[in-house]
């Protein structure tokens, strides 16, 4: 049993709305092994993983998967469920999976995940476990789970950051983790995005953080603002510290100037010896030390966010209670085993450390780590109450008086922070600070909020939500997004939309099979209609509006880069790429395209003349608007939609019409669009109708839509290899990236229209090719289609497009199809020779199609010796000259 292929579907995909791992598994010599015939397999599996009883599987009830095991299933299906179970044991809760038969002992196994590193490791472990059990061998599950948990902890999101991220997701704000192991996130898209690291937001000023890191400067500024702070000084040497303590004449606290999380802090120093020990601890965390008056009272933390007090907690130092039998060390170890406690900040509470601080404090109480405290005796293990050193917290938000709330907000504003945690010491937080001698001890620029989200006692406070409110107000951080999919016309429609929206004054981000464009400038060339390119646009801070071409391949390889879009456009579903990636039928292909349609939150634009597109409407959420487009004003689907008051775009008597409820707007004549080639290119008219409907749904004005479509030009500079027209000695040469029967049929119709515009009918000649990864029947269908719509067909091959086929093989298949429909078929494998042959068969006024998968340079090179003047003219035009 082996892995043939594996993909991380990072976004919404064909199988789920959530990220999934897709693996093609070849069961090999175990392809005939089923769980009901493998001796003892099911019993041993359930002994190892009793949590599999919770898997409902397709049976849909408790122990449903166990029932499936007993009745018999393939081992790839078992791998799916074991992968899910192992992830759960590692601490990442997932429950979605599927297994599809791919034939010949191969299966497509889909498993949901939370962390990529965990799911890939879990899948490998699941394969090893299932193979071992199938062969009657043992498996070291405990070691595997321990390794998975270590991986999960390494990649886990901190509890505080997770609370903010969770609040953002609940608001519908897009969330993207920028690194696998750090708490660095991007919240929102485009120009509305904000970055978050731990609890530091994009609005947190660098200078303000620097001030908060300098405890003495913080105290100075707070004192200037009338905020009570403890008296103190900074020192560099022990002698200076001793003098400062004598001058203060009271119990003191010693701490590093720029420390955090309570590191190096010692409270209640009364003697020179205690001060000396405290000084050395503080020096381990910084060169400059603060010696300040020890403020008596309880330790409180107040969180200020969004210009208000969001939460407050009473923090208690870590402590254990004696049972008369256990040592302090054993009591602490027992406490640290509680599920709520973990390492660092990854859990609700942190494990209590047994370090020098604990040793000193224990000595003051007359204990050591190995002492056995009497039953009921409390044993304190820390002088401070930071959660990061094992403390606990109780919510006291409702106790804060208005004076203290105002004081806390003023303190944070004085430092210049947007989010801050204030450490307050006082006898009773319910009383104003000044009347009881309380003080603000510190201001923290990156405060932990788990004490507020998950207090040990009291009311939990949604501190993450308060921080998100401060970052986004009532917004969701999203920019408008239009996603375009379909078999043909995606790039042209996407560019029409981008051009029109940019012309309306918005900064655009756009992905196509030609590249990535930011505000009209190409920032990356190549086929960019997939996940990574869309992500690069959505994360660009200079984008107000995104238009994303979303191709079949990108959906299948990585899923969508967005959880939802405002408007989805499905242009058509026709025969192409069948037999690849498990997509074997037209119904399969339609389901892939429907992934984009189902992602729409506002509206979906569908082709009323395409049965597969029309069928998608039934599976959309009720609140999502359906808009249709059609080049046939009498289309029954369109007419029913209009009668019910729906919005649509259609062609009527040569005019593009937008129907907006009861109103009908003629936006322009088809002949006024350069891309329509005087009305001959009906496929581009259809593209324009789809674009118009999408812009209407997105809220653009009618005038903006009309101006955009009227000024969009489909040439080699703006839209290369999409219905580009050149003149060669009076012959109209149409260059296009056609690669499937529907595209060739549309270009044949365009060529016939162009050839009959003058007084007499001229001929049409096609120079055609296709990629080698198409099925035999698809290549023959391309040839047959061209034979039907063109007067003469010349078949050639581009060597870079063989894709596993022998030279001449695909050309022969296309020629065979063309011969069935036409006797005027030629086979000329070299593109240059094919082009020259085609031009010798043409007269002025004829229309020649050159279908190329590379560039117009092929045409230029073919003409270099044959017609130098035309070659130079085309090269200049193609370069934008």
Image (cartoon, helix red, strand yellow):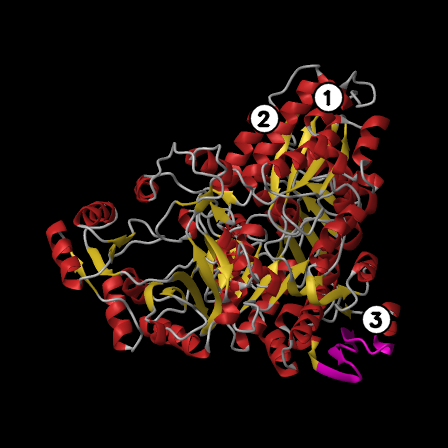
Rendering coords of residue 101 (x, y %): 77, 33
Q: Could you tell me how far apart the alpha carbons at marks 1 and 3 are, in whole angstroms?
A: 60 Å
| Residue 698 part of the magenta-drawn span | no
- First in sequence, mark 1 or 3: give its number: 1
Label 2's element?
helix
Q: Could you tell me how far apart the alpha carbons at marks 1 and 2 are, in whole angstroms?
A: 15 Å
Rendering coords of residue 590 (x, y %): 77, 52
Identify the residue under disc 3.
638
Identify the residue under disc 2.
142
Q: Residue 604 carries which label?
A: none
Identify the residue under disc 1.
44
| Residue 659 part of the magenta-drawn span | yes
| Number of the front mark, 3 or 2 | 2
Quarter of the image for the N terminus: give it.
top right
Rendering coords of residue 469 (x, y %): 52, 70
Region in magenta: 641-666
């Amino acid at each position: 049993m082996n892995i043939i292929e594996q993909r991380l579907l990072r976004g919404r995909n064909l199988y789920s709305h959530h990220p999934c791992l897709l693996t093609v598994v070849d069961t090999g010599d175990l392809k005939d092994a089923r769980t009901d015939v493998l001796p003892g397999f099911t019993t041993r599996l359930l002994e190892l993983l009793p949590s599999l009883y919770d898997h409902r599987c397709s049976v849909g009830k408790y122990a449903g998967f166990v029932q499936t095991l007993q009745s018999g299933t393939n081992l790839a299906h078992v791998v799916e469920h074991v992968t899910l179970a192992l992830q759960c044991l590692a601490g990442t809760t997932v429950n979605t999976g599927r297994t599809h038969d791919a034939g010949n002992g191969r299966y497509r196994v889909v498993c949901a995940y939370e962390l990529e590193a965990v799911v890939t490791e879990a899948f490998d472990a699941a394969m090893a476990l299932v193979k071992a059990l199938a062969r009657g061998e043992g498996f070291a599950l405990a070691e595997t789970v321990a390794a998975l948990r270590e991986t999960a902890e390494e990649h886990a999101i901190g509890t505080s950051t997770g609370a903010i991220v969770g609040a953002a997701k609940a608001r519908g704000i897009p969330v993207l983790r920028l690194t696998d192991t750090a708490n660095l996130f991007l919240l929102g898209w485009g120009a509305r995005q904000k970055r978050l690291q731990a609890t530091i937001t994009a609005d947190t000023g660098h200078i303000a953080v620097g001030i908060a890191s300098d405890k003495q400067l913080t105290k100075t500024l707070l004192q200037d603002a009338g905020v009570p702070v403890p008296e103190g000084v900074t020192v560099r040497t022990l002698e200076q510290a001793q003098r400062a303590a004598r001058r203060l004449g009271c119990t003191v606290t010693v701490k590093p100037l720029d420390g955090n999380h309570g590191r190096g802090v010692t409270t209640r120093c009364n003697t020179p010896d205690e001060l000396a020990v405290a000084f050395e601890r503080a020096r381990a965390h910084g060169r400059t030390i603060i010696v300040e008056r020890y403020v008596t009272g309880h330790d409180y933390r107040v969180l200020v966010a969004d210009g208000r007090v969001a939460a407050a907690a009473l923090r208690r130092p870590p402590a254990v209670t004696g049972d008369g039998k256990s040592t302090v060390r054993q009591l602490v170890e027992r406490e640290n085993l509680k599920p709520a406690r973990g390492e660092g900040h990854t859990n609700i509470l942190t494990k209590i450390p047994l370090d020098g601080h604990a040793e000193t404090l224990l000595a003051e109480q007359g204990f050591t780590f190995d002492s056995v405290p009497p039953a009921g005796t409390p044993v304190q293990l820390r002088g401070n109450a930071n959660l990061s050193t094992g403390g606990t917290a109780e919510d006291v938000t409702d106790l804060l008086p208005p004076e203290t709330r105002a004081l806390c907000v003023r303190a944070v504003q004085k430092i210049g922070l947007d989010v801050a945690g204030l450490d307050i010491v006082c006898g009773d937080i319910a009383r104003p600070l000044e009347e009881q001698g309380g003080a603000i001890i510190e201001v923290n620029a990156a405060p932990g909020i788990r004490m507020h989200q998950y207090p040990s006692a009291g009311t939990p406070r949604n501190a993450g939500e308060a921080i998100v409110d401060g970052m986004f107000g009532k917004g969701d951080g999203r920019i408008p997004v239009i996603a375009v999919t379909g078999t043909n016309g995606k790039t042209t429609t996407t560019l029409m939309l981008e051009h029109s929206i940019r012309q309306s004054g918005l900064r655009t981000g756009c992905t196509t099979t030609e590249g990535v464009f930011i505000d009209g400038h190409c920032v990356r060339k190549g086929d960019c209609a997939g996940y990574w390119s869309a992500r690069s646009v959505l994360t660009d801070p200079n984008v107000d509006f995104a238009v994303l071409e979303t191709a079949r391949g990108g959906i299948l390889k990585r899923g969508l880069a967005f959880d939802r879009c405002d408007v989805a456009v499905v242009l058509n579903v026709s025969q192409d790429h069948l037999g690849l990636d498990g997509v074997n039928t037209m119904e399969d292909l339609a389901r892939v395209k429907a992934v984009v349609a189902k992602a729409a939150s506002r509206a979906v634009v569908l082709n009323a003349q395409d049965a597969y597109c029309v069928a998608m409407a039934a599976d959309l959420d009720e609140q999502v608007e359906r808009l249709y487009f059609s080049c046939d004003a009498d289309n029954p689907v369109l007419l029913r939609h209009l009668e019910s008051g729906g919005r649509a775009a259609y062609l009527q008597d040569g005019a593009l019409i937008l129907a907006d409820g009861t109103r009908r707007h003629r936006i322009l004549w088809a002949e006024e669009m350069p891309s329509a080639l005087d009305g001959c290119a009906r496929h581009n008219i259809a593209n324009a109708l789809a674009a118009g409907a999408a812009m209407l749904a997105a809220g653009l004005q009618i005038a903006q839509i009309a101006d955009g479509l009227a000024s969009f030009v489909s040439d080699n500079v703006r839209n290369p290899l999409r219905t580009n027209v050149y003149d060669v000695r009076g012959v109209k040469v149409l260059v296009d990236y056609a690669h499937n029967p529907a595209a060739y049929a549309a270009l044949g119709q365009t060529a016939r229209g162009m050839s009959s515009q003058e007084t007499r009918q001229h001929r049409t000649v096609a120079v055609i090719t296709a990629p080698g990864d198409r099925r035999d029947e698809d290549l023959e269908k391309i040839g047959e289609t061209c034979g039907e719509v063109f007067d003469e067909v010349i078949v050639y091959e581009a060597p870079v497009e063989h894709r596993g086929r022998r030279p001449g093989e695909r050309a022969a298949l296309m020629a065979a199809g063309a011969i069935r429909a036409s006797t005027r078929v030629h086979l000329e494998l070299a593109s240059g020779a094919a082009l020259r042959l085609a031009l010798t068969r043409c007269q002025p006024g004829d229309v020649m199609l050159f279908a190329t998968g590379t560039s117009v340079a092929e045409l230029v090179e073919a003409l270099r010796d044959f017609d130098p003047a035309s070659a130079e003219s085309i090269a200049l035009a193609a370069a934008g000259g």
